């Protein structure tokens, strides 16, 4: 079954991947894997905004693929490339099988989660708790690399609980890179596995950007991306100017996708922006929405990811209201998005009139 899934996806993706730039190029700016957020609909919209940035799936556990055969979790559109699959697990042989399935499904990269502090992750002995076991992480990565031809990468923290990041992080990078991993995304916070919730772990532990800069100086041959607390594209550019190879943005890219991704291609990659106006990106999204609805999907499954497209612009609140209140009603479809677009256009015209 995994083989047939892989064949189908690889056939669809072949032409796109043959023309693709190296994934490391796309990793100059990436959108972090976020549970319940970066699903295939979110990624499709993000790809419309940026043709260059690297996108990540939500974390998929290796048991779900290997034991549960939950291959539907790997569904993605050819247009999403370059796109990486993030796996959660700690059993080398099971992760190797999950990585093989993911690579056959057409993903451009396999990423191991060593950063998530969620309780459901800790209970499975993977995520940030693995910062305590760099040898096991190295073994897992080596097992995955042995069975796939795509890059195997790691997303990690700078440490957990009472660990000393200045000691733990360089030792972790040295051990795991010794297994052949050359690209890491480092969330520049410790994870407190005891005493803080996953949400609190995204805000309360202090950020240590200088430590990540130091790791780049100490490991110049590794491709290091910084993650954590980056709220604007301007901040991302400053981190790149400090010598880092990439920046990974999470919540800001989700809540303000136009602000982060709309200008990413020209500013980060030196390429032409796909759209000059978020209105145009919404229009480009409509055929995808129509196809999803035609296949029996619900509008809310897509529109929830579009709520922040006009953040900070005239009509943003009305845009969110129209979609939030109407998307889950019976028969909600493309017409509702067009209605919301008209509201934004009207708000823009009103703002221009007020300036006269």
Image (spheres, grey):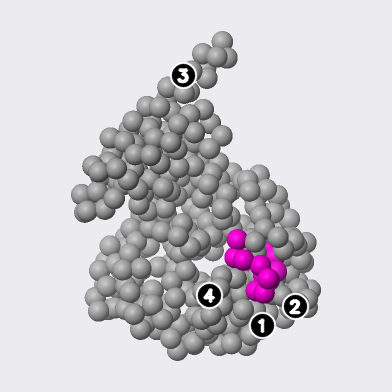
Rendered image: mark on residue 132: 1
Is 148 placed left or right of 242 in the picture? left
Residue with the mark numbered 2: 163
Residue found 34% across the figure and 39% down from its top = 326
Q: Which mark is residue 121?
A: 4
Q: Secondary structure at mark 3?
A: helix
Residue 349 disc label: 3
Question: Can the viewer see residue 276?
Answer: no
* Number of residues whose C-alpha sits closer than 10 Å to that of mark 3, classed few (under 14), some (14–19) or many (20 or more): few
Q: Quadrant of the C terminus?
A: top right
User: CA–CA distance between discs 3 and 4?
Assistant: 48 Å
Mark 2 and mark 4: span between their CA atoms?
A: 19 Å
Residue 197 forms part of the magenta stretch: yes
Q: At x 51% / y 74%, what residue is drawn?
A: 120
N-terminal of the two: label 2 or label 4?
4
The location of residue 59, given as percent across then percent down, is 47, 68
Residue drawn at point x = 59 percent, y = 44 percent: 267
């Amino acid at each position: 079954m995994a083989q047939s899934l892989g064949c189908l996806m690889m056939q669809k993706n072949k032409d796109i991947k043959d023309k693709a730039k190296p994934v490391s190029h796309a990793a100059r700016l990436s959108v972090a894997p976020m549970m319940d957020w970066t699903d295939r609909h979110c990624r499709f919209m993000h790809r419309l905004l940026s043709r260059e940035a690297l996108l990540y799936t939500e974390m998929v556990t290796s048991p779900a693929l290997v034991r549960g055969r939950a291959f539907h979790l790997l569904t993605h559109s050819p247009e999403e490339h370059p796109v990486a699959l993030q796996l959660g697990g700690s059993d080398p042989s099971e992760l190797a099988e999950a990585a093989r399935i993911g690579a056959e499904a057409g993903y451009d990269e396999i990423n191991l989660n060593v950063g998530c502090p969620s309780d459901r992750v800790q209970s499975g002995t993977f995520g940030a708790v693995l910062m305590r076991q760099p040898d096991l992480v190295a073994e897992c990565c080596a097992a995955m690399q042995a069975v796939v031809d795509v890059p195997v990468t790691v997303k990690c923290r700078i440490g957990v609980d009472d660990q000393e990041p200045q000691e733990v992080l360089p030792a972790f990078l040295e051990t795991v890179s010794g297994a052949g991993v050359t690209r890491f995304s480092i969330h520049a916070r410790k994870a407190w596995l005891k005493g803080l919730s996953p949400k609190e772990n995204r805000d309360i532990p202090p950020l240590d950007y200088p430590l990540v800069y130091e790791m780049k100086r100490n490991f110049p041959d590794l491709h290091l991306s910084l993650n954590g607390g980056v709220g604007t594209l301007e901040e991302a550019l400053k981190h790149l100017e400090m010598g880092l190879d990439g920046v990974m943005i999470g919540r800001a890219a989700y809540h303000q996708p136009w602000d982060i991704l709309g200008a990413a291609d020209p500013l980060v990659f030196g390429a032409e922006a796909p759209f000059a106006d978020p209105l145009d990106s919404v229009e480009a999204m409509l055929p995808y929405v129509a196809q999803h609805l035609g296949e029996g999907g619900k509008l809310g499954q897509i529109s929830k990811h579009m709520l922040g497209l006009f953040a900070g612009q005239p009509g943003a609140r009305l845009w969110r209201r129209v979609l939030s209140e109407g998307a889950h009603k019976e028969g909600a479809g493309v017409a509702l998005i067009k209605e919301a677009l008209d509201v934004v256009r009207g708000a823009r015209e009103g703002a221009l009139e007020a300036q006269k």
